[in-house]
Amino acid sequence: MYKRFYNFDLSDEVLNALSEMGFEKPTPIQESAVPPAMEGLDIIGQAQTGTGKTAAFGIPIIEKGKRGKVPYAIILAPTRELAVQVAQELNKIGKNKGILSVPIYGGQSIDRQIRSLKKGVDVVVGTPGRVLDHIRRKTLNLKNIQTLVLDEADEMLNMGFIDDIETILKEIPTERQTLLFSATMPKEIMRIATRYMNNPKKVAVDAKNMIVLKIKQVFYEVREEYKIKALTRLLDVEDPSLTLVFCHTKREVDEVSGKLQQMGYYAGAIHGDFTQSHRDEMMDKFKKGDIEILVATDVAARGLDITDVSHVVNYSIPQNPDSYIHRIGRTGRAGKSGIAITFVTPREYRQLRLIERSAKTRIEKAKLPTRDEVRRAREQEILDEIDDIIKDENHSGYLAMVDELSNRYSQRDIAASALSLIFSDMETDEEDEVGVSDISSAKNYVRLFMTVGKRDRVKVADIVKSIASGANIPGKKIGNIALFDKFSFVEVPHDLADRVISSVDNSVLNGRKIRVQPARAKKSVALDSVRAV
Ligand code: ADP
Ligand code: MG
């Protein structure tokens, strides 16, 4: 039916803005939601992430509004990050009409928000808690609201916002248009829809739409203790632009990001325990590519739109199929292709099959790169870099050294020795002796008990650092770390345990003397259960 945005009967201001944004034609959800939304109908839109839902409600809202003093549209979104993102997109669409959209979320100074609301805002994009806060303080005038949007409604439900949302719904004039967007439609959402919406029109995009087709999905069988190694091998070989790594718990996020940093990867972390400014900073760095790997929990990463994510890694398998779809929807965005990787431990096979069945997708088994493949990838990287250096003539400063060496050696020997310098830097980890089969099979780790914990403001990364430098072993040799209030458990390879104990026991960490000894009783079983908390 509709092929292009101009078929939507939009103003030149909006059409030009869309074309400046690089939008050539509507996505399927936009195609089916924009026309009825322009007519003023209530809509329930179901489509997975990355399908362009923001513009699906954003275009009609902007098209129908104009710059004024009092908000005429309000969008509720589950997280601060998402609120910021939606406001940004609306500001782009509304640029030529001068329509101002402002995000309102917890964690930002409420006074500042009150000031900007007073100055005059056209579209408010807020998290439910903070919006309610403003309603109670009477700093948000909802009398003129013509359109209300519930974005990522299922996630707002998951986050326990349902009561807040109902309260807000009751505050907004009933003579309004209500648009509800959600990736899934649980009963609770349908209840809200029947109660607060006016004969809503349902639009859905097939679960098997273009986005999923653009994502290559693979899984690797990896044992818990080798996940880090598997991850770094994949990172080395696949050379992703930006990688989003999903973990199950906040603690796991800390662990994984800490270890990656320790090994020299540009990695960062976000989860609910970090301050808003820290999270903003991380997102910013990730978008700019200052960090290449972002390790996150589901909730923290929900709805984030980062266009260049080439790889999504399910470091721990998602707990349900919906979560799988959401996670992998972070890649393959805006027409780009992406790769979704899932680590599966042997006892998680059933979970994998369950995901495949209900997400109606196929996840192919893949083999981890071998040591040789990692090596070849590194070699190729060096060759490419040399190409660049010669092209850009960045080597001229070294020609004199080469001339001097040429008196004694052949060019071939000189070049090869120079390369060996580069590679010897990379190969310091005798760790690479561990082959694929080892990664996938049990290995002897010993659990140590350490008398430091969260209470001492110690982080996983600190423990890794203190052991790695104290015992002079590579950080990646260190296995799982479980941090408790007053103590922690650390897994180290059997053959290194004595070395770790003798060098770290009685040493000082964060101003506290620490004791280290072999932990008693249960082995990794205990750690697994700790993780699951
Ligand atoms: P969703 O809310 O469904 O997860 P978003 O609205 O965040 O998806 O859109 C995902 C990405 O696709 C964003 O970067 C957005 O700017 C881009 N996008 C949306 N619609 C189009 C379009 N018609 N053409 C090109 N890119 C688009
Ligand atoms: Mg969205």
Image: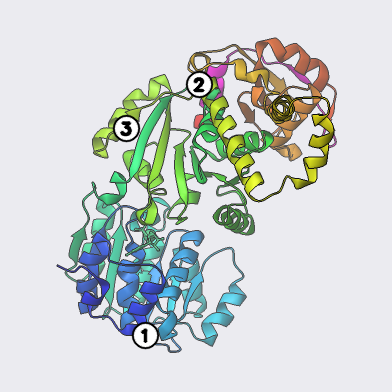
| Ligand 1 falls in quadrant | bottom left
> What residue is rendered at 79% in x and 35% in y?
402
In the image, is the residue at mark 2 within 8 Å of ligand 1 by its beta carbon? no
Instruction: Check disc 1 and report the residue beneath it.
Output: 144
| Residue 251 relative to residue 55: left or right | right
Q: Of the residues under marks 3 and 1, which one precedes in the sequence?
A: 1
Name the one closer to the observer, 493 or 212: 212
> What residue is rendered at 39% in x and 29% in y?
219
Name the one closer to the observer, 522 or 397: 397
The nearer-to-camera label among 2 and 3 is: 2
Where in the figure is residue 129, as x and y percent of width and height? 48, 64
Quadrant in the rendering for residue 52:
bottom left
Amino acid type, residue under disc 2 in the picture: Thr
Disc 1 secondary structure class: loop
Quadrant in the rendering for residue 263:
top right
How would you rate the neighbour count of disc 3 (Cα within 10 Å): few for under 14, some for 14-19, many for 20 or more? some
Amino acid type, residue under disc 3 in the picture: Ile
Q: Of the residues under marks 2 and 3, which one precedes in the sequence?
A: 3
Residue 370 image label: 2
Where in the figure is residue 57, as x and y percent of width and height? 31, 70
